[in-house]
Image (cartoon, rainbow, N blue to C red):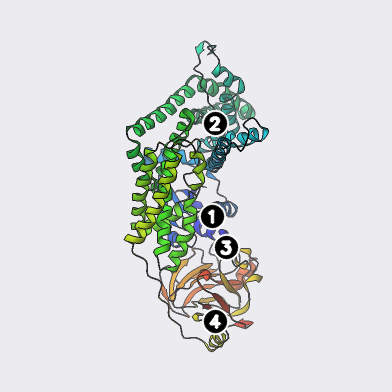
Amino acid sequence: MSNKELSQQIITLVGGESNVNSVFHCATRLRFKLKDSSKANKEALQKTPGVITVVENSGQFQVVIGNNVGQVFEQIMKETNLQDAEQGSKEDAPSDAGFLGKAVDIISSIFSPILGALAGAGVLKGLLALILSLGWINGASGTYLILNAASDSVFYFLPVFLAITAARKFKANQFVSVAIAGALIYPAVITAVSGTEPLSFLGIPIVLVNYSSSVIPIILAVWVQSYVEKWFRSVIHESVRNILVPMFALLIVIPLTFLAFGPVGSVISNGLASGYTWLYNLSPLVAGAIAGAFWQVFVIFGVHWGFVPIMLSNISTLGYDTMLPILSAAVMSQAGAVFGVFLKSRNTQLKALAGSSTLAAVFGITEPTIYGVTLKLKKPFIYACISGAIGGAIIGMGGARAISFSLPGLLALPTYFGTGFSWVVVGLIVAFVLAILLVYVLGFEDPAETETASSTTAETSVDRVASTDSLIEKEVLVSPLAGAVSPLSELPDEAFASGAMGKGIVIEPSSGRLTSPVNGTVTTVFPTGHAIGITSNEGAELLIHVGVNTVKLKGKYFDKKVQEGDIVKQGDLLLEFDVEAIRAAGFVTATPVIVTNSANYLDVLSTKEPEVKSGDYLLTVMI
């Protein structure tokens, strides 16, 4: 399924565009805030090709996509009038989300947009430190100066980045927020911090701290800014509102930040760092075991975002963080567990999913692994938690440190170079290998392969099989429509024509009667009626999409005759539609019939006839 089709189906199944308050995305999932979550078809979404799973947490309806989430999100923005929640959501988190839910929502909204930049810069910073320690580069050279600026700028100007995302979340003026952040790291202010002269504002002493790389002060400042702007907008005439509201916001919030929010935020940051350090120092081994065991559980519930400010505060105040190396053990244990599934499973579809998920997990993206494989199979997830605990304990015992922020995983290794680095290497290897062994030796309930049996074939398909002596017939599909046949590549829709969604054929319908091409189960019926998905009893997954962009008709001219879950026989009526009315409305009615799991077969062969009747031979899937 193409990103465009997937985005359309997701919007439909969450209850339509009208049911969405806002949507944004993180590394692997779309995060919706719905007006009424009961209108979302969670079960159908979970069965949708391209969707790993659906999670409801912290007032959010989260659709887990995996690494492709950015492209799907872009299509949603193109196909709808929804606003990116990172640019200002229509409504805040639901009032019934609770304090924890609201806190997680705020943190994830503020930090997730900049996570990629932080992680990339963190890895670069670690690599540069490694190269410098090995003597491969001169610390006084221009090369080092530029690369250090590239790796350090995100962290030094972190208040500016957070000002932008916090302004989006709190619905404040972004440029005023950036100006506030700029004041915190203004060169003269940074110089004053290192000076000995006491400073005051209107006679009130100023407690100066270094706000570069700080987190909490700017978030507090922007939060207050949003209320200041809201009040002044309500009392200032619109003729001068665009000038005076920003002026008063700067005039009030910046001094307040230096006098109150900054010192208070600094105290909170120091408190978080000190509190974590105190707990860690009680027993690094126990701390490592607990974090290694439960980190992926936190990921499942979405509360892992709450630890991001602590990590950043540790790096800002202490110069390092001991949590990040431990969390890499949890990540590598999931990678090991899913690789164990890949080695052990006899289910070809599960094996393929496990293989691709292993690579993503090694580099720190574990949601496809968790939701797609280990959590579904239960035992591998438990084995991964055990392995993560042991690997985390080893890393914690070694006192390993991260010198900059990055996503836990193999790519983050350069950021752990230094104290306890060898313990990190050992801990990650133990977590990965132990998870493989536990999964492979103790096993799990391997889903049975879908049973296959040869179907009775039409005479044309027998002739086709006889001419392909290296192939064995798998299944024959008959035409669901009457009309002219053309190659898939000629369809004026790149998503289908490119074959990205699977192999198939196109029928230009001569009538609006669509019947089932196989014996099977209806797996998807779009609410608009323009597309139907069927899984045959032999395992072929089919998508029949009437026309191009006909989703825009919003169900007009379509009359659905089946529902999701219905058992159908070859020739059963699925849908009726008004061909002429659809064409008169300016839409192409050419209908692709796609085998969406074509990758599971050696080939998909099609009829050579220029026209077919409903029930005539159309396609053969080969294995």
User: How far, Cα to Cα, is label 2 from label 3?
Assistant: 46 Å
The residue drawn where x is 47% and y is 28% is 317
| For marks 4 and 2 on the same chain, the one whose residue lies earlier in the sequence | 2
User: How far, Cα to Cα, is label 4 from label 1?
Assistant: 36 Å
Give the foreground label among 4 and 3: 4
Q: Dot 3 surroundings within 10 Å: few (below 14), some, or many (20 or more)?
A: some
Dots 4 and 3: beta carbons under 8 Å?
Answer: no
| Helix, strand or loop at mark 1 | loop
Residue 566 placement (x, y as % from top left): 41, 71
Q: Farthest front residue?
A: 135
User: How far, Cα to Cα, is label 3 from label 1?
Assistant: 27 Å
Task: Give, as a three-letter code, the residue at label 1.
Answer: Asn
| For marks 2 and 1 on the same chain, the one whose residue lies earlier in the sequence | 1
Q: Which residue is mark 2?
A: 159
Q: Which residue is mark 4?
A: 470
| For marks 4 and 3 on the same chain, the one whose residue lies earlier in the sequence | 4
Residue 394 placement (x, y as % from top left): 37, 42
The residue drawn where x is 46% and y is 40% is 421
Task: Give, as a three-letter code, the residue at label 3.
Answer: Leu
User: How far, Cα to Cα, is label 2 from label 1?
Assistant: 29 Å
Q: Is residue 391 left or right of residue 462?
A: left
The residue drawn where x is 50% and y is 50% is 363
Task: Give, as a three-letter code, the residue at label 4.
Answer: Ser
| For marks 3 and 1 on the same chain, the one whose residue lies earlier in the sequence | 1
Q: Which residue is mark 1?
A: 68
Give the foreground label among 2 and 3: 2
| Helix, strand or loop at mark 2 | helix
Q: Is residue 219 left or right of residue 495?
A: left
